[in-house]
Every structure is written in structure tokens, then in C-alpha cells.
Amino acid sequence: MDIHYVYILTNTNNTVLYIGRTKQLKERLNQHRNNNSKSFTGKYNVTKLVYFETTKYVNNSIKRERQLKKWNREWKISLINSLNPDWKDLSEYI
């Protein structure tokens, strides 16, 4: 059975939020960190993993990613704060 991730990245100042989904979170984080300056994450140096959740089914991860992208900034910040109030980089926990 596969695990699918929905995740939120931010920059070093915690000012920019990026929401994505993937099946291979470690590899995807490496891609974000090695991205060129033309991509959104590269342009804004969005490489710090501050939130992630898992699901068994790809359709659920697609639905959740779309839902989070529609949320206003305050809701996203509250979600992050609920599990990671210090906004630590969670990469080491994957």
C-alpha cells in the first residue's frame, strides 16, 4: 500500500507558503531544495517543511491539497501552529 503526502513548505522568514502533494516526500523535498530560480519554490527559497499529513489514497491527497490551497492564510497558519507551533523544519521526521 502506498502512502501519499500533502505538505506545506515555507521560506526562512516563514512569510511564503507552498502547498503540494507527493508519494515520495523525501525526494520531492530534495527537488524543491535543488530547484532553479525560475520555479516558485526556487524564486522564494521555499524549502522548509513545516507541515505534512498522510493518506492511503491518491484521490484523498488530491482533494486535500485542493482544499488547503483554497484556505485563507490565517487558516493555513492555524493548521501549521496546531502541530508545529515553533515552525521547525520537519524534514528529519520523514
Image (tube, rainbow, N blue to C red):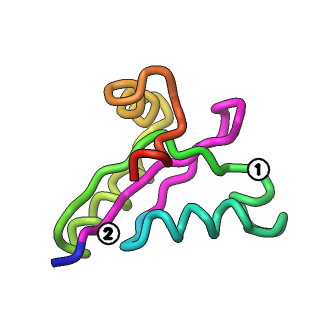
* Residue 60 sits in quarter: bottom left
Q: In the rendered image of this protein, does residue 12 appear above or below residue 59? A: above
| Residue depicted at 41% across the width and 70% down the height | 22
Of 11 and 60, nearer the camera is: 11
Q: What residue occupies the far front of the structure in this picture?
A: 92
Given contact means CB atoms under 8 Å apart, are the residues at marks 2 and 1 in contact? no
* Sequence order check, earlier mark of 2 and 1: 1
What crowding class fits label 1: few (fewer than 14 Cα within 10 Å), some (14-19), or many (20 or more)? some
What crowding class fits label 2: few (fewer than 14 Cα within 10 Å), some (14-19), or many (20 or more)? some
Question: In this image, 35 relative to 6: left or right?
Answer: right
Magenta-colored segment: predominant secondary structure: strand
Q: Which residue is mark 2?
A: 62
Question: In this image, 57 relative to 5: left or right?
Answer: left
Please state the extent of the stretch shown in magenta in the rendering.
Answer: 3-20
Amino acid at circle 2? Ile
| Residue depicted at 73% across the width and 66% down the height | 34
Q: What residue occupies the far top of the structure in this picture?
A: 86
Question: In this image, 36 relative to 91: left or right?
Answer: right
Does residue 50 belong to the magenta stretch? no
| Residue depicted at 17% across the width and 68% down the height | 56
| Residue depicted at 52% across the width and 46% down the height | 49
Percent position (x, y) of residue 30? 61, 65
Percent position (x, y) of residue 28? 53, 68
Assign a secondary structure to mark 2: helix
**Image mark for residue 44:** 1
Of 3 and 81, nearer the camera is: 3
Does residue 4 belong to the magenta stretch? yes
Assign a secondary structure to mark 1: loop
* Residue 13 sits in quarter: top right
How far apart in space, not on screen, are marks 2 and 1 (Cα)? 24 Å
Q: In the rendered image of this protein, does residue 85 appear above or below residue 16? A: above
Percent position (x, y) of residue 40? 71, 61
